[in-house]
Image (cartoon, rainbow, N blue to C red):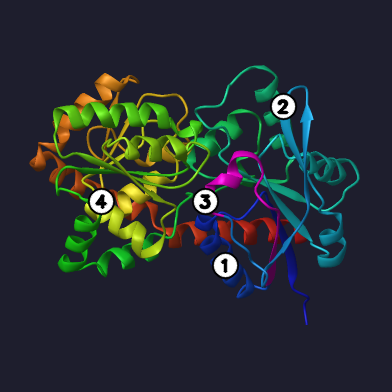
Amino acid sequence: MKPMIRVLIIQQYIPGYRLPLFEQLHESLRRNGIILHVAYSDPIGPDVTREDKMEMPEIGTRVATKRLNYLGKSMTLKSVNRIISTFKPDFIIAEQAVKNMENWSLLLKSTLQKGIPVALWGPGCAPGEPMTGGFSRAKSVMTNMADWFFSYTQSGAEFVISRGFKPNRVTVVHNSLDTLGLQRELGRIDEATLLEWEKVHGLTRGKTALFLGGVDARKGIEFLLDSASRIAEQLPGFILLVGGAGEESYMVTQLQRRGGPVRYLGRVKDSEKALALRSASLLLIPEWVGLVAVDSLASATPLVTTNHPSHAPEFEYLEANRTCIVTDHDPVSYANSVADLLVDSERIEIMKAMAKMASLEVQFAATVENFSEGILAWTSEESC
């Protein structure tokens, strides 16, 4: 009997939104003769305060991580040698992250010593990252050392190919979230439950918006809260729900205690996340739109953002003036656009319908299938 192929994924930590991917990918690969295992560590730095770490004892192993400082840059080094020696992977998939020092060692062993083949997975190059200079060169060098590349989106694949990666060794996974699970939770909400939620949080239907994500500087929280106060001045009764946790959560709670137009929910998931989305007319994400684009489409909740350079590749899932609104990056323009949209219920309904149609292109099942098929193609080619 042919032995099963063993694939190890090395992950910084397991945020809640990644757990379904690894679980379903494990099952899909098992049916195709591949054993998947995940080596992961605890979150470090700002990620600790996001309160979203998960454990995977059945299909994963937690490894120690050291935080290093190199030329003023924060780096990490995961202790993966033990799991590699015990699990004995035939293939390794690591995150496309220059700061992950173990990547360099694994890639050098793979390319120079004909060691375990290593693939990378990630954004290719996010729009918010610098395209020139030392960082970009290091990222291109690391990426081109890999044996295969799993890209979050089509644009990421095109970028790494433009930097020299072989097109026939790139898989586009179409990075997504558990859309089916979210839509199932949304479908369970009846009118009475929604009314009670609105009553508890003091919400007025049609005058409520939602922020979802890490509550830290990377998401423009100060800009968001400034904008929320300006919206409330134009639209009495407006409330911004804030779902998430992070280093700047205190700014939200302070504004709420002062009577500001915000309600801090903390980290939300499952039914609470669905209720927050159902009660909101809009998602407000002024900076760094990433996988929240999938939440927006899957829940048919139009998103309002700015032309900030921080957006991740998943931002391309949205279409300006159809499923999202993009304003100049200043609180006045942003607040005016949100206030104008909230009083235009007909336009919101049109955008909701467009989001619902667009959600068909970001289904989670396709992400699992694409990733699985890419791993099968890679392992099959290397085994020939």
Give me the C-alpha separation between circle 2 and circle 3.
Answer: 30 Å
Give me the C-alpha separation between circle 1 and circle 4.
Answer: 26 Å
Quarter the C terminus occupies = bottom right
Up the image or down, 231 lies above or below 84; here it is above
Mark 4 is surrounded, within 10 Å at the Cα level, by few (under 14), some (14 to 19) or many (20 or more) other residues, namely many
Boundaries of the magenta span = 34-52
Q: Provide the residue designation for mark 3.
A: 173
Q: Provide the residue designation for mark 4.
A: 300
Label 3 is placed on what type of residue? Val
Give me the C-alpha separation between circle 3 and circle 4.
Answer: 22 Å
Q: Residue furthest right?
A: 113
Q: Provide the residue designation for mark 1.
A: 23
Give me the C-alpha separation between circle 1 and circle 3.
Answer: 16 Å
Q: How many marks?
A: 4
Q: Which is in the foreground here, disc 1 or disc 2?
A: 2
Percent across and percent down for residue 144 are 71, 35
Tell me which numbered mark, 3 or 4, is placed earlier along the sequence: 3
* Residue 102 circle label: none
Q: Say what secondary structure mark 2 lies in.
A: strand
